[in-house]
Image: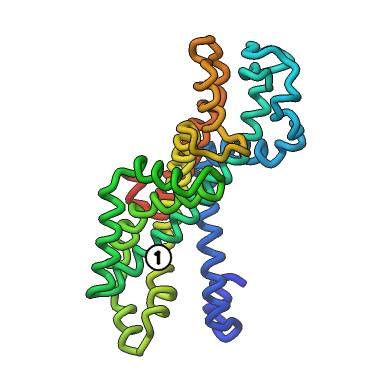
Amino acid sequence: MSTSEIHDNPARLSPRGIVRMRRRAALHKFTRSFRHSPSGMVGLCLLGVFVVVAVAAPLVFPRSALDVTQAIANPFQPPSWDYPLGTDDSGRSVLALVVWGARISLLVGLAATVLSMVIGTTVGISSGHFRGWTGGALDRVTDWFLVIPYLPLAIVLATVLGRSMLNIIIVIGVTSWPGTARLIRAQTLSVEGRPYLERAKALGAGHYHQMTRHVLPNVTPLVLANTTLAVSISILSETTLSFLGLGDPDNVSWGSILEQGFQAGAISQGAWWYLGAPGVCVVLVVLAFNLIGRAVEGILDPRAAGR
């Protein structure tokens, strides 16, 4: 049903139906605007390639291709027709390692970002909505996490929790939320002063109703734009922790490939393909998410496009 039909026959839809129709219209407008963003489409296509590669990894290379005992090629063999990205120090195909590594790197990056956004959004809305001791305590906790250097804190937590994929997700998510909380808090303070929220308070709306029905929908665009930019940071964090030997030893990721190549002396051996392939993949995925994030930010906040 079109908007004009609703204006002509307002009784045909319930209030919830009107809300759903407006949300569908907003989603359609966002999709149309995103399709007209060259940088956003380039980032989306680039990201789509990596997602397809990650999903199809078991179909392209069997799991046994990662087993050191199954390797039959020469160590540090340069790229060839049989091994397009060469081999590692154990004779395994670097291409197989990179393809399987995409699964872990993308999964950890996305899962850690979701955890970070949930914590940051909850703390940001709560610290901006509540006054007095509660809001002040949450604000001080955010300041504490912002003051502590990120990488040393992540290293300490990863060392204490142990080496596993779940622990890496928790470490990245727990240490990367303060920036999001600061942004959401500032937006929450702006929303708190709007007339419709004052009316909701006067009508007796509780804190939960105010935060979920009035504040959260208004900060959601900022959360979405920040999420796409935070994924790239999470992927870089996973790569850094894996390179430092704190990643999951049972799974291959781009960071673990870089760490193994460094430990095996790929630089002194002149095996540039061993370190270059996962490094380029990290750069391309980070670039893809940044392009998508900037496009989303420009659509949701037209003032950002001018800057």
Q: Is residue 72 left or right of residue 49?
A: right
The quarter holding residue 99 reads top right
Q: Which residue is mark 1?
A: 122
Amino acid type of the residue that numbered disc 1 sits on in the rendered structure: Thr
Image spot of residue 58 (x, y percent): 74, 37
Q: Is 142 placed above or below 236 here?
A: below
- Residue at x 33% of width, y 52% of height: 179
Circle 1 Cα neighbour tier, 10 Å, few/some/many (<14 / 14–19 / ≥20): some
- Residue at x 68% of width, y 22% of height: 93
| Frontmost residue, 152 versus 221 | 152
- Residue at x 75% of width, y 31% of height: 64
Query: In the rendered image, which quarter contains the N terminus?
Result: bottom right
| Frontmost residue, 173 versus 41 | 173
The quarter holding residue 213 reads bottom left
The quarter holding residue 101 reads top right
| Frontmost residue, 91 versus 207 | 91
Image spot of residue 227 (x, y percent): 45, 51
| Label 1: element kind | helix
Q: Is residue 243 visible?
A: yes
Q: Is 68 placed above or below 216 here?
A: above
Q: Is residue 288 left or right of residue 137?
A: right
Q: Is 96 placed above or below 15 here?
A: above
Image spot of residue 279 (x, y percent): 51, 26
Q: Is residue 114 left or right of residue 58?
A: left
The count of marks equals: 1
Q: Is 27 placed above or below 197 here?
A: above
- Residue at x 75% of width, y 17% of height: 72
Question: In the rendered view, how is the structure colored?
Answer: rainbow
Image spot of residue 85 (x, y percent): 64, 19
